[in-house]
Amino acid sequence: MQFKWYGNQTFCDIFPDLYAKEAIKNVKVSESLQGNGLVPLWKWNWSESLSVNEAQQLTELQGLFDGFSLHNNNHDQWRWIPDSNGLFTVKSCYTYLLDLRQVELQDAHVLEAIQHLWKSDVPSKVNVFDWRLLLNRLPTRATFHHHGILTSHHELSCVFCFQQAEDEKHFFFSCPFSKGVWNTVLSWLGTSLQTGVEGRDHFLLFGDFLKMKDKGRVRYLVWLATTWNIWNLRNKVIFKGNISDVSSLLKTIKLHFLLWFTNLYESKTCTPFPFWCLNLMSCILST
């Protein structure tokens, strides 16, 4: 009665009245159920007579074992329920998850941005992070509040400016600190971007700055390096007490970009790091 034979609950939790009158509390199913399943024989040790309601519960309990038979010579084993043969495979798990999925239609621009994102050669954790960013699925403070994890409004403020609640749009694109970061990055690129652009549009416009036939895989590296490091700095401010500083963050962004870029063009990249910091576009074109 104390084992999980049915779903995620034990029989003693499903039928507490019966459990209270069972004399042997740790009785096993194999000790109570005998026979071959077609003609089950039940053995109970009640401490007192069952009421009418409890007798009905007993009928329900025994009904759960209709057609069930115990094989005393066989050991217990795990069985993967979603597959008819009881064996777990990645394919069967994938199929099972697809059956459970909830269809959510995405904007065409979001899909376009995601397609470009997955073609970028960056560490997988960065791709997954920015994929969540484009879908507004990051664990921001606003998200925690929506799920009831953070309940105080004092806990929702952006860690950089403390002026608004921390959601994706504000944190990455509207916060004064983040705007300052983007302005320095754009200055490094030698270009500018219209104000008020956010999310997937911001991502796609950044790609247009490097729209070159032979540089398709690096078009979004600057954007990915910027968002990734802004988020990392946010976590360091929260958990380590770091200070928000645009100039030091820009150095980290440049370093990440160069590391990812050289992974693609290692044999062709010989320009010293200081030159990359001064004129990014010229260095890319010369590679």
Image (spheres, rainbow, N blue to C red):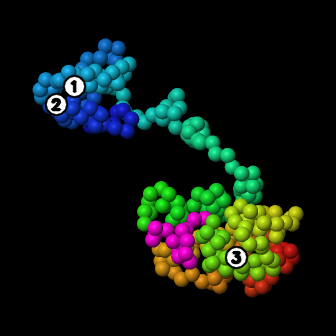
Q: Earlier in the sequence, mark 3 or mark 1?
A: 1
Q: Closer to the camera, 92 or 170? A: 170
Residue 179: quarter of image:
bottom right
Mark 2 touches mark 1? (CB < 8 Å): yes
Mark 3 touches mark 2? (CB < 8 Å): no
The residue beneath circle 2 is 21
The residue beneath circle 1 is 54
Where residue 76 appears, as percent x and y from the top left, is: 37, 33
Q: Amino acid at mark 2?
A: Lys
The residue beneath circle 3 is 182
Q: Earlier in the sequence, mark 2 or mark 1?
A: 2
Give me the C-alpha separation between circle 3 and circle 1.
69 Å
Secondary structure category for the residue under label 1: helix
Instruction: Sort mark 2 into few (<14), some (14-19) or many (20+) by Cα contacts within 10 Å.
Output: some
Question: Is residue 278 located in the magenta-colored stretch of the structure?
Answer: no
Q: Residue 58: tell me if it is visible.
A: no
Which range of residues does the magenta coloring cover? Answer: 153-168
Where residue 182 appears, as percent x and y from the top left, is: 70, 76
How many marks do you count on the picture? Answer: 3
Where residue 228 appears, as percent x and y from the top left, is: 63, 69
